[in-house]
Image (cartoon, rainbow, N blue to C red):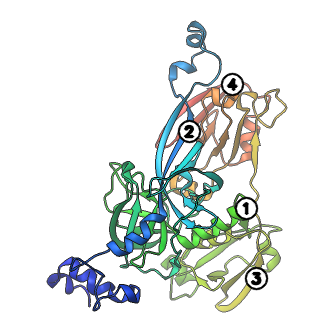
Amino acid sequence: MIRPLFKHLAPLSLLALSFGTALPAQAQVQGTLPLQQGMPSLAPMLKQATPAVVNIAVTAKSEVQNPLLQDPFFRRFFEIPDEPQERESQAVGSGVIVDAVKGYILTNNHVVDQAETIKVRLVDDREFDAKLIGKDPDTDIALLQIKADNLKALVVADSDKIEVGDFVVAIGSPFGLRTTVTSGIVSGLGRSGMGTGYQDFIQTDASINPGNSGGALVNLRGELVGIPSQILSRSGGNIGIGFAIPTNLAKLVMNQLVQYGSVERGRIGVGGQDLDPALAKAFGLSSTRGAVINQIMPGSPAEKAGLKSEDIVLKVNGREISSFAQLRNIVGLMRVGEKVDLDILRNGKPRTVSVVIGKAEEATVTGGKDGSGDLHPALAGAVFAAVDEATAKRLRTGGIQVREVAPGSPAARAGLRPDDIILSVNRQPLASVEQFQRLAGPKAGELLLHIQRGAGALFLIIR
């Protein structure tokens, strides 16, 4: 048992004993970490790893959110143009070089989202303009490219092989402090529920703060195992709960961004839920690992492949799953036309079903300025869709989500913002895009929208 060791060994000694065999042969010294001036040290590994972690500076323009500027009388009195007022903002983050030849840099989508310019600074102080190859908000991954010589890239490890308790090191630029290194362990695996999109986070207590986003989480070999993305905090600072995107997920997204410039979501057309103890007992199962299918969409790939409601999915392409979210994540990151093998239990008997991934279709509606669109003319310039499953589960509500708002459009001037969730129209709760279209159609009069925005809510009148 390792627990009693903590009572008798200093943390540094434990680190040395635990990871002597995990390092390359040339770095091992009598079963300890490499010696630096007679003491175990991570410095030799970091000298090799840190040149691959870069600082990213972003310049973006954002609309000024001043309530006075929404008042037509105020705008006319002070002769303010009837156009959105913008201001330039700057932000910093981190990135990690994963291909030294092609100059590819992985970072977070939220680091470069809405960026006008992106500059990358290397450890040796060279600075380059970066090209955005593509980004995927659902996984919070973005791919940049720079043209530079003598780049250093990190080896990308198989993140499926890491275990809870493995030591890891986070490298990035928290609060603009370049090339900052913090250490900790892997605290948990397969974390989700921290927001929308596709999530399979590595949890770590290595200190992650604003500015670390997009940097590197490495093992003691200096291999990349994750991309720091989020923290759980009440103050905005680190409290020992940080989350990184595993490299296997990041590689899937990166490959699609390189080849297609975007990620095309796949689907098989099933609804499902996790197996809790009561469901497992009802189905005669001894374990709660897996996901039960409770709905098959008509005409879907799942129906064509012969999947049925009450099938229990145990493995996806040979990988065991413990929740329906894992099934959704794996399928959602596969390309349309690929085949996925599902190991299932049907009436207690095992079988394998192969399903060809179909395209994830989403009903969306827009407004037209001349009244010819799907919605009220004052909603022109915005794209609306049903609240995705992850958001609905997190907020415990339905509604319609504002996916896009064009700057300067009627919808923007009316006060709508991307990611707003419209809960009701004229006090009628929303359950579908079709209902929203009926209530807020092109011939509708004044609309009263109940909107949830972040942690708050407001009413908005549309005329």
Q: Quadrant of the C terminus?
A: top right
Residue behind mark 4: 446
Q: In percent of the image, x 41 and y 76: which residue is there?
A: 219
> Does label 1 or label 2 sit earlier along the sequence?
2
Q: Say if residue 318 shows up in the picture.
A: yes
Q: Are marks 3 and 2 in contact (CB under 8 Å)?
A: no
Residue type at tag 1:
Glu
Residue 252 vs residue 461, the one in the foreground: 252
Left or right of 459 on screen, residue 264: right
What residue did someone put label 1 on?
Answer: 264
Q: Please identify the quarter of the rendering in which residue 138 is found.
A: bottom right
Q: Comparing marks 1 and 3, which lies closer to the viewer?
A: 1
Q: Tag 2, which secondary structure?
A: strand
Rounded to the nearest whole Å, what is the CA distance between mark 1 and mark 4? 37 Å
* Quarter of the image where one finds residue 63: top right
> As displayed, is residue 36 above or below residue 179?
below
The residue under label 2 is 60
Three-letter amino acid code at the position of disc 2: Ala
Q: Position of residue 457 (x, y in %)?
A: 50, 37
Residue type of the residue flagged with mark 3: Ser
Q: Residue at x 52, y 40 (%)?
A: 453
Look at discs 4 and 3 and give the one toward the viewer. 3
Measured Cα–Cα span from mark 3 to mark 2:
45 Å
Label 3 sits on residue: 354
Asked if the residue under mark 4 is in contact with the one under mark 1, i.e. CB atoms within 8 Å, the reply is no
